């Protein structure tokens, strides 16, 4: 199976690597690993895009922790290669076709873009002791009620597969993973939105998330799931 990952594009048709979110994603990855007392010697990312996430995550660890990225896009590799450091390495390879094995393997906003995502997940299992997934939760009560409207939204069309919390966890369990922990993340709550597209939803999401994060994700959307699995 060839690992195929389709990146989104911005309004000008340029490939969008979402680098502005890398420090936020890294903070949440470190949070779930630290919470579960996982102290890796090496961390791997499949589908690293422009490579900024590994650089941001490395800031949380000593220099003796090594970071490795695997990517099949030549354009992504050319950008990421410029960011290599003594303990951060990028490869233009498909991780699933190697015999590599790491303490932690990350697939951050990746398998929703992979056509054969079940095959991808099944093969990824053997590549690391622990796995960290970040999955947008795009199926909500509101999106189902307004399905015709949401079908035309750019962020919905950019993914091949869509999930809610239950289907995301069930997909991982169905492909052989043991769920260790998970946390809800929300870019709209944690980061500023200079264009103000999500401004009206921020306050109700914040209130409902404080009361019941699971219900907030199901009803209002704007959340993702960070999952630690084995």
Image: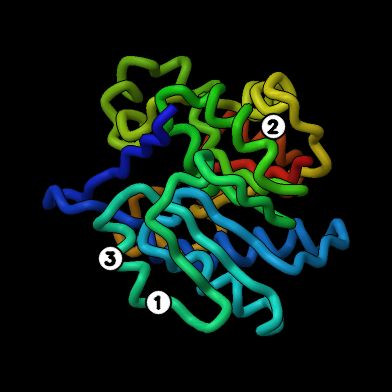
Task: Residue 216: give x, y in percent of width and height.
Answer: 64, 36
Dot 1 alpha-carbon crowd within 10 angstroms: few under 14, some 14 to 19, many 20 or more: some
The relative height of residue 69 versus residue 153 in the rendered view (above or below) is below
Q: Is residue 51 visible?
A: yes
Around disc 2, counting alpha carbons within 10 Å, would you say few (fewer than 14), some (14 to 19), or many (20 or more)?
A: some
What is the basis of the colouring in this image?
A: rainbow
Q: Quadrant of residue 204?
A: top right
Tell me residue 38's x, y (percent).
83, 61
Q: Which mark is residue 83?
A: 1
Which picture quadrant has residue 146? top left
Q: Nearer the viewer, residue 119 or 186?
A: 119
Write down the residue under mark 3. 78
Q: Identify the residue shown where x is 36% and y is 62%.
A: 50
Residue at numbered disc 2: 215
Tell me where residue 111 appears, x and y as whole percent.
50, 35
Q: Residue at x 38, y 31 (%)?
A: 159
Tell me the quadrant of the picture where the N terminus can be found. Answer: top left
Residues at discs 3 and 2 in contact (Cβ within 8 Å): no
Q: Quadrant of the C terminus?
A: top right
């Amino acid at each position: 199976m060839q690992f195929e990952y389709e990146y989104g594009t911005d309004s000008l048709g340029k490939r969008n690597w979402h680098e502005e979110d890398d420090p936020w994603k890294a903070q949440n990855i470190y949070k779930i690993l630290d919470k579960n007392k996982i102290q890796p010697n090496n961390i791997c990312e499949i589908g690293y895009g422009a490579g900024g996430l590994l650089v941001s995550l490395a800031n949380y660890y000593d220099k003796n922790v090594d970071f490795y990225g695997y990517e099949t896009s030549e354009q992504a590799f050319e950008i990421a290669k410029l960011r290599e450091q003594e303990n951060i390495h990028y490869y233009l390879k498909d991780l699933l076709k190697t015999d590599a094995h790491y303490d932690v393997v990350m697939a951050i906003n990746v398998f929703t873009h992979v056509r054969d995502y079940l095959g991808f997940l099944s093969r990824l299992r053997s590549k690391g002791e622990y796995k960290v997934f970040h999955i947008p939760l795009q199926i909500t009560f509101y999106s189902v009620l307004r399905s015709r409207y949401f079908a035309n939204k750019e962020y919905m069309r950019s993914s091949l597969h869509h999930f809610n919390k239950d289907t995301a966890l069930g997909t991982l369990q169905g492909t052989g993973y043991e769920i260790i922990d998970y946390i809800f993340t929300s870019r709209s709550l944690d980061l500023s939105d200079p264009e103000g597209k999500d401004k009206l939803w921020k306050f109700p999401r914040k209130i409902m998330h404080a009361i019941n994060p699971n219900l907030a994700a199901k009803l209002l959307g704007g959340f993702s799931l960070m999952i630690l699995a084995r």
